[in-house]
Structures are given as structure tokens and as C-alpha cells.
Image (cartoon, helix red, strand yellow):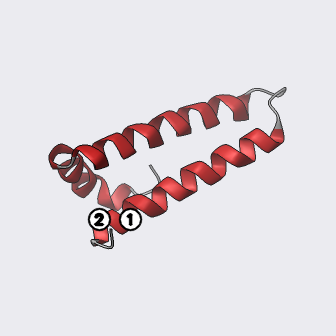
Amino acid sequence: MRLPATRATIRTAAASQPHFYELCGAYGEACAVLDRMRRDRSADPAIITEYETICAEIEVDVIRILLGDQ
């Protein structure tokens, strides 16, 4: 995750909030797919862009939850 300063807070929230835990899992899966596609020269650039957007949106959701905005 691109939020290294919040890792401890994220772990604590994930341990106590099942929805947040699942959101973190979805983020991990999306990032893994994105990493694989970036290495695959035959990957469709539109799909890569879509996964970049998905990862960014999940990051925004994580920040909102950590700040108590959701």
C-alpha cells in the first residue's frame, strides 16, 4: 500500500472491522493483478488504467475510513 505511515493503524482497523479487512483484501488482490499486468507487455493498456483507478479509489476509501469519514 502506498500509505506506509498508516500501516499500524490499518492493521488495527482491519483486525476489528470485518468490512475494512475485506476492503484491504480487495486492494491487495487488485494491486497484485495490476503488478502482473504491468509486467506483461501484451496487457491491454485500458485494463491497466482501469486497475490503476480501482486501486486509487480503494486507497481513498481506506483513508476516509481511517479518518472516520465513512
- Amino acid on which disc 1 is placed: Ile
Residue 58: horizontal and vertical position, in percent?
A: 48, 54
**Secondary structure at numbered mark 2:** helix
Mark 1 surroundings: few (<14), some (14-19) or many (≥20) residues within 10 A: some
**Residue at the spot 71% in from the left edge and 35% down from the top edge:** 38
Q: In which quarter of the image is residue 66?
A: bottom left
Outermost residue toward the left in this view: 16
Q: Mark 1 points at which residue?
A: 63
Q: Quadrant of residue 48?
A: top right
Q: Name the residue under label 2.
A: 66
For residue 57, above or below residue 29: below
For residue 36, above or below residue 62: above
**Residue at the spot 46% in from the left edge and 43% down from the top edge:** 27
Decide: marks 2, 1 in contact (CB < 8 A)? yes
**Residue at the spot 29% in from the left edge and 47% down from the top edge:** 19
- Amino acid on which disc 2 is placed: Leu
Residue 49: horizontal and vertical position, in percent?
A: 73, 48
Question: In the rendered image, which quarter contains the C terminus?
Answer: bottom left
Q: Which of 3 and 22 is in front in this view?
A: 22
In the displayed structure image, the side of residue 39 where residue 26 appears, left or right = left
